[in-house]
Amino acid sequence: SGILEWNMSASSSSFGCGDILPGLILSYDNLPHYLRNCFVYCSIYPKDYVIGRDELVMQWLAHGLVEENEGIDAKLTANQCINDLI
């Protein structure tokens, strides 16, 4: 299960030594498909950069990562994606 994988990953020696790639891959693999591109997009920002919600929403929309979904406005959908990711 996902929880077991997280526990194993968190207790592994590589996870605690700054190698976050296995944790990111695990996160990515467990995301619904509609969130994967949004998750990956966040990796273009430098470490410790504070990403503004509005900035991120506008970037996702400009790059076509989030669209209107079942009649829900694209901006609302993008904000929900952020909520789902955090």
Image: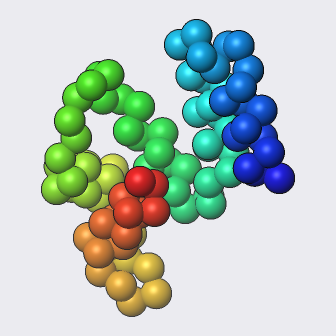
Q: Name the residue at the top extreme.
A: 17
Where in the figure is residue 73, as x and y percent of width and height?
Answer: 29, 80
Give whichever of 12, 30 is nearer the camera: 12
Most distant residue in the bottom direction: 71
How many callouts does the rendering have? Answer: 0
The picture places residue 71, in percent across and down from the top left corner, at 39, 89
Q: Residue at x 23, y 29 (%)?
A: 49
Residue at the spot x=83%, y=53% of the render? 1
Q: Position of residue 7 (x, y in %)?
A: 73, 38
Q: Is residue 2 above or below residue 24?
A: below
Residue 66 in view (yes/no): no
Describe residue 16's horizontal placement relative to residue 13 as left or right.
Answer: left
The colour mode here is rainbow
Residue 70 seen in this snapshot: yes
Q: Residue at x 80, y 45 (%)?
A: 4
Residue in front for this viewpoint, 7 or 65? 7
Give residue 76's quadrant in the image: bottom left
Tell me the quarter of the picture where residue 85 sits: bottom left
How far across and down, in percent of the image, does residue 45 sit?
A: 30, 29
